[in-house]
Image: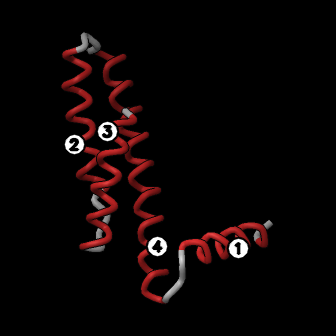
Amino acid sequence: MIVIAFLFTSVAARAIAVVGTNPISGMTLMTLILTSIFLVKAGLSGKSGMLAALLIGGVVCTALSMAGGLITDLKVGYWIGATPAIQERSSSSGRSSRR
C-alpha cells in the first residue's frame, strides 16, 4: 500500500506540475485494479478482500489529494516568487489565526 501510494503520488505530482490537472480518479482506479489482483493472488477474496481493496484505495486517494494540493501551492508560490519556507510560515500563521 505504501509503495503504491509513493509511486502514484510522485506520478500525480509530476502530472499536476506539467499539465495542471489532478489525476486522482484514474490513479485511484488503477490502485483498485492492481490491489484487487494482488489480493486475489494472495488468497484474500470475498467481502474481506473487497474491504481491504477499498481501504487501500482510500489511503492512496487521500495521499494523491494531499500531494495535489501541496504541489499546486508550491507551483503558484514559485510563480509569485515565494520560497517553500516562506509558504510554510505563511500557512502556519494562517492556521494559528483561525482558532
Cα separation, mark 2 vs mark 3, equals 10 Å
The disc labelled 2 sits on which kind of residue?
A: Met
Between 79 and 96, the one lying in front of the other is 79
Q: Counting residues from the N terminus, which is met first, the one under dot 2 or under dot 3?
A: 3
Element on which disc 4 rests:
helix
Query: Callout 3 environment at 10 Å: few (<14), some (14 to 19), or many (20+)?
Result: some
| Figure check: 49 above or below 67 | above
**Label 4 CA crowd tier, 10 Å (few <14, some 14–19, many 20+):** some
The residue to which callout 2 is attached is 30
Q: Which residue is mark 3?
A: 4
**First in residue order: circle 4 vs circle 3:** 3
Cα separation, mark 2 vs mark 1, equals 36 Å
Which of the 4 quarters of the picture holds residue 52? top left
* 2 horizontally vs 7: left or right: right
Identified by mark 1, the residue type is Gly
Lower position in the chain sequence, tag 2 or tag 4: 2
**For the point 76% across and 70% down, which residue is it?**
98
- Count the marks: how many? 4
Work out whether mark 1 precedes mark 3 in sequence or the reverse, and give the earlier one.
3
Residue 56 in percent (x, y) is at 38, 33
Question: Is label 3 in a helix, a strand or a loop?
Answer: helix
Residue 13, percent from left and from top? 34, 61
Q: Residues within 10 Å of mark 2 (few under 14, many from 20)?
A: some
Q: Are marks 1 and 3 in contact (CB under 8 Å)?
A: no
Q: Is residue 74 left or right of residue 9?
A: right
User: Is 36 situated above or below 73?
Assistant: above
Label 1 environment density (alpha carbons within 10 Å; few <14, some 14–19, many ≥20): few
For label 4, the residue is 74
Q: Measuring 41% from the left and 40% from the top, which residue is drawn there? A: 58
The mark found on residue 43 in the picture is none
Q: Which mark is residue 94?
A: 1
